[in-house]
Amino acid sequence: MDLIASTWMTRSLDEPVASVGLEEDGSVTAGGWNGSVKRWDDKGDLLWSTILNDRVNDIVFHRDCLIATAGLHIVCLEKSSGIVRWTHALEGSADAALIHNDVVYAVSSVYDIEHNDFIESAVWAYDLDGTERWVNRMDERPWTILSSNEQVWLGLGRPKCGFATIAADGTLLHCDGPVDAPITSGDSHGATLAFGHADGTVSNQSSKALRTFETGIESLVCDEAGIAVAEESGHLHSMAYDGKLNWSLNGDSIEAQCIGFTINGHKSHWFSRSTGTKSSLSVANGEDGTLFVQSESVDVRYLSCVDNRVVAGCQNGTVYVWEQGLFGRRISDQNEQGALAKDPKKTALQDRLRKLRER
């Protein structure tokens, strides 16, 4: 089965994709390395296109607005037209954005070339109209920002490491992690949070180490069943929230991953690998890790799933969207063809039926 031939929609951003936003209504917004932003509706029609001043690192939605981080700026656009409502320059690069309780949070960081490290970071809070509420500066870089349990959470780098929650006035409450290693990634599902550390530890919001892997955690994603963990080495694991390992897959570095829609009764896990010279996109059974399908030479840098659609953004500027119903039918057809190929009697019967239809 060809993954690309089974897409519901294929579009182009005309520059390498840096971020993608997929909404519940099926609309897709893609941001590029050079600042291009395009938005398509649920039918695949282009709604608008605009250019921001730099790479679009993050895209989030809220009501009628779209918040993007672009280079040094946090930008608010009208979701229906792409018109810029307001923009603010942050101190250093604008790394990530989050909207919580009608407040826009943005994370920025300053990188020092001489020290070869981040020397200062900040968390900013704005009202939806662009009015600045507060800014909290810190030495630690927040590598991840999450919203869960009616709170905003930051996973921190050195020197403190651990994580922090943010009060409405910007006050940070710091909590030590289970290990003295930076938190490099995080995700949440309902009231449960999971953090990945630079030493390979996976922990939760109670500062409990759930499991430790051999290399640092590149990314992790959560659902009701557990956590999918990508190591820097390229190992991909599925684990329960009690730390029990479900399955593992080895290979090249994981570029992106997401928990996808259900395929013929089985949840799916999508992931892309890349070495710089070769790449692949795979869809696995999220329950046992067996591969549904894999396609080579698909350089995917971003993956996301909302309801019955999965979206992928690629290095060559292509944006792919797969739809649950169509994808499930293609998988069923592939399985049926595979079964026929293994059974000479069924293959012969199929040939006779085809000849009768052609008369």
Image: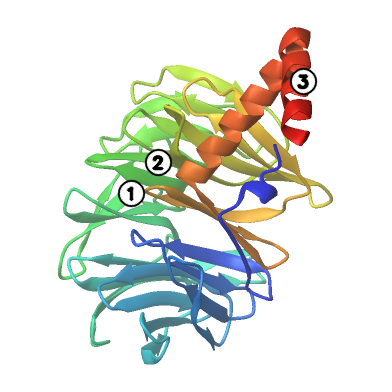
What's under tag 3, amino acid-wise?
Arg
Q: Is disc 2 placed on a helix, strand or loop? A: strand
**Can see residue 110?**
no
Q: Disc 1 vs disc 3: which is toward the camera?
A: 3
Give the CA distance from mark 3 to mark 2. Answer: 58 Å
Give the CA distance from mark 2 to mark 1. Answer: 9 Å
- Residue under label 1, please give it: 163
In percent of the image, x 30 and y 35: which residue is there? 207
Left or right for 337, reference 52: right
In percent of the image, x 38 and y 84: which residue is there? 77
Give the CA distance from mark 1 to mark 3. Answer: 66 Å
In percent of the image, x 46 and y 66: which residue is there? 43
- Which mark, residue 208? none
Q: Tell me where residue 237 appears, x and y as whole percent.
A: 54, 28
- Which mark, residue 352? 3
Q: Tell me where residue 244 appears, x and y as whole percent.
A: 42, 17
Relative depth, front residue between 174 and 302 = 302
Relative depth, front residue between 55 and 6 = 6
Q: Are marks 2 and 1 in contact (CB under 8 Å)?
A: yes
